[in-house]
Image (cartoon, rainbow, N blue to C red):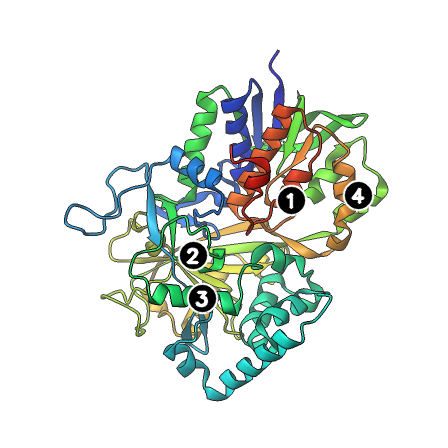
Amino acid sequence: MNRIVLIAGAGPAGLTAALELLRRSDCIPIVFESLDDVGGISRTINHHGNRMDIGGHRFFSKSDWVMDWWRTMMPVAPEKNADGLSVIPEADRHLLVRPRLSRIYFLRKFFSYPIALSAQTLGNLGFARLVRIGLSYAWACLFKRKPERNLEDFFINRFGKALYATFFRDYTEKVWGRHCRDISPEWGAQRIKGLSILGALRHAARKLFSRAPADVAQKGTSTSLIERFLYPKYGPGQMWHIVADEVRARGGIIHLGHTVVAVRMEGLRVVGVTTKDSHGHVRTWQGDHFISTMPISELVAKIDPPVPAEVLEVGSGLCYRDFITLGLLVRKLKPTPQGKGPMNLVPDTWIYIQEPDVKIGRLQIFNNWSPSLVTTPDAIWMGLEYFCQEGDELWTMSESEFFRFAVAELEKIDLIDAADVMDHHLVRVPKAYPAYFGSYDLFSVIRDYTDTVPNLYLVGRNGMHRYNNQDHSMLTAKLAVDDIIAGNVSKRGIWEVNVDDEYHEEKRGAS
């Protein structure tokens, strides 16, 4: 008899797990997704034909398995035609090879990201500030803070106090809503541990003396330094719709608009889940295994019979950072030295807004992710990204209020004129970023409990309460499937995966 694997969430982790089960076992996955679309935070929003990528998703990984998996689902389009000109393929189902440029906007000027010792940087910062940065970096190299008690220590150890204060402190506080001293250093270890000043300088030197374009794999390059990445022609959601279609074609089941409201246990095994659909209908499903990508704070609260009080208390204390993105269609940007054409289009995919006098955190230029995301002729389609908390002033604004507020901010920092705005669309994303504060320092209490449940597998960003990229989420799902097929009840391999590692492929194999 076929085993039933229940999966909470149809994002990258949940859909990867479902497809891998169908490809490699006789298990039947049943996926429950609370939204009416697949992809999770990697979905694509379509507004009047203009598509929004929620948070920006570069298809890049140091895992050969993940890169091959993506290319199996969608072929990579040729970059140039017979005349050597860049092309966007007419066929829809293609991965494009895209140039990556992310910059910092600070002092109403553009800075390279990561910071490069270029003439532009020298001129933008000024001699006095550069001297302070250089001296403080030398001091940090000689006298590192040990142990690293918080994220501030992590940054200062790697970049020095002056550079930390200039480019990391205020932006990080804008993202997380609290001082770096109140955030665990594990956030830095998860997201930027491979980035350093010396690494950035070595990368810049290699780039200076090499004329060949960077290979898409770039396995020896820190994630923050990659120059090219793969990207679906119509945004990340296109990939996950293709995956969902294959899951269904192979006999898997995906229920959209179904929220898991209870996780049923008998002894130390999950035996089923209860869901409520968008019409209010409640149903209980039986299963042999349960793969969860749902927020852990919700998972532990929904387990029946209830988990131990200590586990429930830690779960209720886990914090999240929520996210709002405003799609903004404009005729043109204000002129800058980098702007080109009548629209003054800058080449960036992302712009980090370091300015302390506005709340906007990042700005996406969707035209540069893929021209096919924008169908309105001669217009720039942008994503204005804000970090907030459910229920705060930003979160509770009406769309019209938020639109006026956000446009005024871009005007204030000299990026647009309000008269050039043509259209807008607002998207709110709760629990977008699991936070490394609150009860996070006690997270081992939850892990120790869930690891004792042999048929429960926690994967993905919210499923593991880790700030993962989608490739990391996919790999944790793949390892969970490996364990289900092999009958392995240890979850250690899943927890060992880190976003900037080689993913332990040498230890476990890259099958």
Q: Earlier in the sequence, mark 3 or mark 1?
A: 3
Tag 3: residue type? Arg
Pinpoint residue 295: horizontal percent, then vertical percent: 65, 43
- Amino acid at dot 4: Leu
Earlier sequence position, callout 1 versus callout 2: 2
Q: How many angstroms separate mark 4 from mark 2 (CA)?
A: 40 Å
- Give the percent coordinates (x, y) of residue 437: 71, 58
Q: Residue furthest top?
A: 1
Identify the mark at residue 312; answer none if there is no mark: 4
Sequence order check, earlier mark of 4 and 1:
4
| Residue identifier under label 2 | 226
Residue at mark 3 to residue at mark 2: CA–CA distance: 13 Å
Could you tell me which residue is drawn at 59 percent across and 69 percent down? 158
Q: Give the spatial CA distance, label 1 vs label 2.
A: 24 Å
Closer to viewer: mark 3 or mark 1 = 3
The amino acid beneath tag 1 is Glu
Label 4 neighbour load within 10 Å: few <14, some 14-19, many 20+? many
Asked if disc 4 and disc 2 are in contact, CB closer than 8 Å, the reply is: no
Secondary structure of the residue carrying tag 2 is loop
